[in-house]
Image (cartoon, helix red, strand yellow):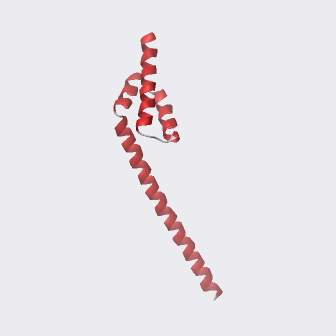
Amino acid sequence: MVNLLTSIIKMNSELLKLFDTYTLSEKDRYEITQIFNLLDTWKKQHLIRNFDTLVKNIRELQDEIRIEQEILIWDVLADIQNAVDLAKQKTN
């Protein structure tokens, strides 16, 4: 039991060091911690060993989401401009 507790504490401290190394947002830290706490010991070790890949994937997904948001914003702005132009045509 003592070995398991020591192992858990060590993994948690390693996770905190990785958070600092990769300068993750508070939101990302929280979400990773929540998932981490649900994993069994082997999967926790795997996550820690492959943390750089996890961060890379998170950042790629965040970039894709940001691009999609920009596209949607420009689409909405175009729709608004079209509605304004149509309203102007109707009043003339």
Number of on-image labels: 0
Placement of 49 over or under 84, stated as above or below: above
Q: Nearer the viewer, residue 87 or 4?
A: 4
Residue 17 drawn at (x, y percent): 43, 31
The relative height of residue 88 versus residue 70 in the rendered view (above or below) is below
Q: Is residue 1 visible?
A: no
Occupied quadrant, residue 19: top left
Image-based side of 12 in relation to 42, left or right: right
Quadrant including the N terminus: top left
Query: In the image, what residue occupies the spot 55% across and 75% down?
Result: 81
Give residue 80's position: percent from left, percent from top.
57, 72
Residue at point 41%, 48% (across, down): 61
Towards the viewer: 7 or 69? 7
Quarter-wise, where is residue 21 in the image? top left
Q: Quadrant of the C terminus?
A: bottom right
Regarding residue 84, the answer to whether it shows in the image is yes
Q: Nearer the viewer, residue 50 or 88?
A: 50
Does 5 sit above or below residue 58? above
